[in-house]
Amino acid sequence: MKAAIRPGGEGCPIRSRVDFDRWVVERSGAELVEPFTFVIDTDGGLRLAPRRSEHVACAGGRPVLSAGEIGFGREEGRWVVAEVSNHSTGYCPDTSSWPTVAEALRRAGLGHPPGFTDEVVFRRCPTCQEHNIVREDDFICVFCGSALPALWNVDPFGQCP
């Protein structure tokens, strides 16, 4: 998939409030009513791309600390994070990645909720190796019926135990 990423197709880096303010004024009203794709790169920086962007493209094909979708709203005249999830089928980040997201948002000067507003539980099936979204605490692979592990085990770069 990394070969399909065109140079310059990465998400916009947001490392400060100035970066965010510059980025948000370039968005249309129609864009701002939908969530955006985000990743937290391995330096802890936030990157934003249009919602229909692939997370792997947003990250330039590189590993990330977290990924998902993020929506913004206005509060007391300032932009804040209104909703944020770890929904990324490209990276399948664990819900425990929230602290890295919160820190990146803090550095970007963005108020945010105390955690993901929508948590997605991902697991890789040890039998068939397919990625699953666990719903209603049903840790059974939808592809082969095998039991899924209780602990997160998805790493698209082959670095998980």
Image (cartoon, rainbow, N blue to C red):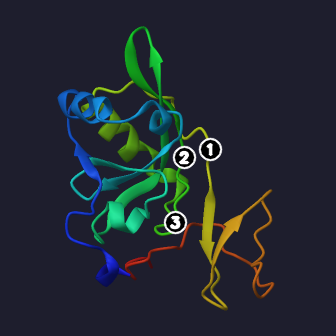
* Residue under numbered circle 3: 92
Mark 2 neighbour class, 10 Å CA radius: few under 14, some 14 to 19, many 20 or more: many
What amino acid is at disc 3? Cys
Sooner in the amino-acid sequence: mark 2 or mark 3? 2
Is there any visible trace of residue 7 in the rendered image? yes
* Residue under numbered circle 2: 85
Q: Is residue 105 left or right of residue 161?
A: left
Picture coordinates of residue 139 (x, y %)?
A: 75, 69
* Residue at horizontal 35 percent and vertical 58 percent from the top: 65
51 above or below 21?
below
147 above or below 28?
below
How far apart, in angstroms, are the residues tagged by discs 1 and 2? 5 Å
Label 1: element kind: loop
What amino acid is at disc 1? Asp
Q: In this view, does 119 lie to the left or right of 51?
A: right
How far apart, in angstroms, are the residues tagged by discs 3 and 1? 14 Å
Mark 3 neighbour class, 10 Å CA radius: few under 14, some 14 to 19, many 20 or more: many
The label on residue 118 is 1
Picture coordinates of residue 17 (x, y %)?
A: 23, 27
Determine the image quadrant of residue 60.
bottom left
Label 2: element kind: loop
Q: Quadrant of the C terminus?
A: bottom left
* Residue at horizontal 52 percent and vertical 65 percent from the top: 92
What amino acid is at disc 2? Ser
Q: Quadrant of the N terminus?
A: bottom left
Sooner in the amino-acid sequence: mark 1 or mark 2? 2
Sooner in the amino-acid sequence: mark 3 or mark 1? 3
Mark 1 neighbour class, 10 Å CA radius: few under 14, some 14 to 19, many 20 or more: few
How far apart, in angstroms, are the residues tagged by discs 2 and 3? 11 Å
Picture coordinates of residue 54 (x, y %)?
A: 44, 64
* Residue at horizontal 20 percent and vertical 34 percent from the top: 19
50 above or below 108?
below
